[in-house]
């Protein structure tokens, strides 16, 4: 689907909403992980963004925090050539971090991407890997300067616009509230990756952050196609998609699903080179979201890519991942 926002002005109110939710507080324990990342990347670091379920964590030691680390340049970020090439070829690179905190251990999964690639992913990538994540609530935990801060807010605003318009062109005409719009969009983006989350997960996330999604939708409305969506006085929206738009949207989301399967397999393969204990993490996440225990055999540990494809195929056939 072509990008309609490259030359379109982003509503100022939308960036204000994003700025407000980006500076909301997080558990103080996460500053330990931020300090470790700041020390590791040094002058290459542009920003650290937190997203995902740990935004609402009451006990940071129980889960695995999700961070995006934005860097100015891959050559500046890595001493190893192969990591630079992997990050340019298929951003982001994903790593694992542990940091001691008194009697507990803090854990994080962090993805490394250049600020320029982050902006492109939020605005112009066909696949929703970046724009679906960063249309959702985030926290900006560390930033180099005000210029980078504004670039991040603008990228996240464009991610919201792309998410909403990509979702709404596929909805049937009629009344829809914010919950329906965002749940529908999240379910579409989940289907575009190999993920263990079910549809109930999308409902849970939207319900948990519904006031934020309401503010984002209202703020984004002036930049959306006015022939597609109209706000009503009762808090609902009227979707006015045409049969042609819906047919085209179905084709695009089908292509994204096929593209996402390939990209997910490539990223999982790449993670075996960058992500320490990636097999244990993947097994833990699958069991957490589905209740299905994945056995990590000695053969799987010795040949994670080759045998991992076999395990992945089994999980796909069983419907554990989609």
Image: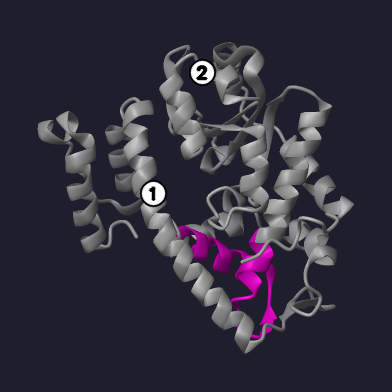
Main SS of the magenta part reads: helix
Let me know if residue 233 is in the magenta part. no
Residue 249, picture quadrant? bottom right
Q: Which residue is mark 1?
A: 264
Q: Residue furthest right?
A: 12
Residue at (79% x, 80% y) in the render: 227
Q: Which residue is mark 2?
A: 78
Viewer-proximal residue among 117 and 61: 117
Residue at (68% x, 73% y) in the render: 177
For label 2, the SS is loop
Residue at (68% x, 67% y) in the render: 165
- The magenta segment: 163-190
Compared across the picture, whether 14 is left or right of 304 comes to right
Q: Give x and y (percent) for residue 193.
A: 42, 55
Viewer-proximal residue among 138 and 90: 90
Q: Specify whether residue 119 is in view.
A: yes
112, above or below 254, in the image: above
Between marks 2 and 1 in the image, the one whose residue lies nearer the viewer: 2
**Residues at marks 2 and 1, CA–CA distance in whole angstroms:** 23 Å
Residue at (51% x, 18% y) in the render: 78
Query: Which comes sooner in the sequence, label 2 or label 1?
Result: 2
For label 1, the SS is helix
Q: Specify whether residue 197 is in view.
A: no
């Amino acid at each position: 689907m072509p990008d309609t926002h490259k030359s379109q002005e982003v509503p100022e109110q939308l960036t204000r909403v994003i700025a407000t939710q980006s500076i909301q507080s997080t558990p103080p324990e996460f500053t330990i992980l931020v300090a470790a990342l700041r020390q590791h990347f040094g002058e290459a670091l542009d920003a650290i963004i937190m997203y995902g379920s740990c935004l609402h964590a009451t006990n940071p030691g129980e889960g695995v925090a999700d961070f995006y680390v934005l860097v100015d340049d891959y050559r500046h970020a890595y001493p190893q050539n192969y990591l630079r090439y992997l990050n340019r070829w298929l951003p982001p690179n994903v790593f694992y971090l542990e940091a001691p905190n008194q009697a507990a251990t803090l854990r994080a999964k962090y993805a490394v991407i250049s600020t320029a690639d982050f902006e492109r992913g939020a605005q112009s990538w066909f696949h929703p890997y970046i724009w679906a994540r960063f249309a959702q609530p985030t926290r900006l935990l560390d930033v180099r300067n005000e210029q980078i801060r504004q670039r991040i807010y603008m990228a996240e605003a464009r991610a919201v616009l792309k998410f909403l318009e990509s979702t709404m062109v596929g909805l049937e005409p009629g009344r829809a509230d914010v919950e329906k719009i965002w749940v529908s969009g999240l379910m579409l983006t989940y289907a575009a990756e190999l993920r263990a989350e079910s549809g109930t997960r999308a409902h849970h996330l939207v319900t948990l952050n519904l006031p934020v999604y309401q503010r984002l939708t209202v703020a984004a409305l002036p930049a959306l196609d006015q022939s597609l969506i109209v706000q009503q006085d009762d808090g609902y929206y009227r979707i006015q998609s045409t049969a042609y738009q819906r047919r085209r949207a179905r084709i695009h989301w089908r292509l994204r699903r096929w593209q996402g399967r390939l990209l997910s397999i490539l990223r999982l393969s790449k993670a075996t080179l960058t992500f320490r204990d990636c097999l244990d993490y993947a097994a833990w996440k699958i069991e957490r979201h589905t209740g299905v225990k994945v056995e990590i055999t000695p053969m799987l540990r010795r040949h994670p890519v080759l045998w991992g494809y076999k395990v992945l195929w089994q999980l796909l056939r069983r419907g554990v991942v989609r």
